[in-house]
Amino acid sequence: MSVLIKPIISEKAGLLANQGKYVFEVLKSANVSEVKKEIEKVYKVEVASVNTISLKGKVRRRGRQIGKTRRRKKAVVTLVPGQIIAGLSEPS
């Protein structure tokens, strides 16, 4: 089973992609070495480093209803200079 859930496409992630860094949502149980191996296998690139961030759910209110967003984990993957992930980087 893959530890990668999906790539995160946002304005900030797009700016990081120009620097050779890509953001992915990963399983909460995933560690740095698992993420690195999976990225190298799926996208066939060489990974320089991986940083992970665990995010707590936020309380959200919609009218009178109060709910909470889900917890998730993100990984910021830095590639070796000169390599890109084709579908995730913006043309420069």
Image (cartoon, helix red, strand yellow):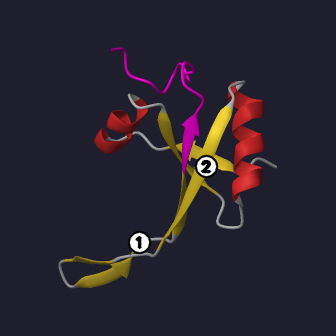
Q: Is residue 49 left or right of residue 59?
A: right
Residue 62 pos. (x, y %):
22, 75
82 in the magenta segment: yes
Quick one: label 1 or label 2, which is nearer the N terminus?
2
Please tell me whether mark 2 sits on a helix, a strand or a loop. strand
Residue 17 pos. (x, y %):
42, 32
Residue 70 pos. (x, y %):
48, 71
Q: Residue at x 29, y 40 (%)?
A: 11
Query: Dominant secondary structure of the magenta stretch?
Result: loop
> Residue 67 falls in which quadrant of the image?
bottom left
Segment colored magenta: 76-92
Count up the numbered dots.
2
Q: Of residues 85 and 61, which is closer to you in this image?
A: 85
Q: Classify mark 2: residues with Cα within 10 Å, few (<14), some (14-19) or many (20+).
A: many
Return the residue at label 2.
Answer: 50
Quarter of the image with the C terminus in it: top left
Q: Residue at x 57, y 59 (%)?
A: 52
Please tell me whether mark 1 sits on a helix, a strand or a loop. loop
Return the residue at label 1.
Answer: 69
Residue 43 pos. (x, y %):
68, 27
65 in the magenta segment: no
Q: Is residue 30 left or right of residue 53?
A: right
Q: Residue furthest left?
A: 63
Q: Residue at x 50, y 38 (%)?
A: 22
Residue type at tag 2: Val
Q: Is residue 20 left or right of residue 63?
A: right
* Disc 1/disc 2 C-alpha distance (Å): 25 Å
Q: Of residues 30 and 16, which is closer to you in this image?
A: 16
Q: Classify mark 1: residues with Cα within 10 Å, few (<14), some (14-19) or many (20+).
A: few
Q: Residue at x 68, y 26 (%)?
A: 45
Residue type at tag 1: Thr
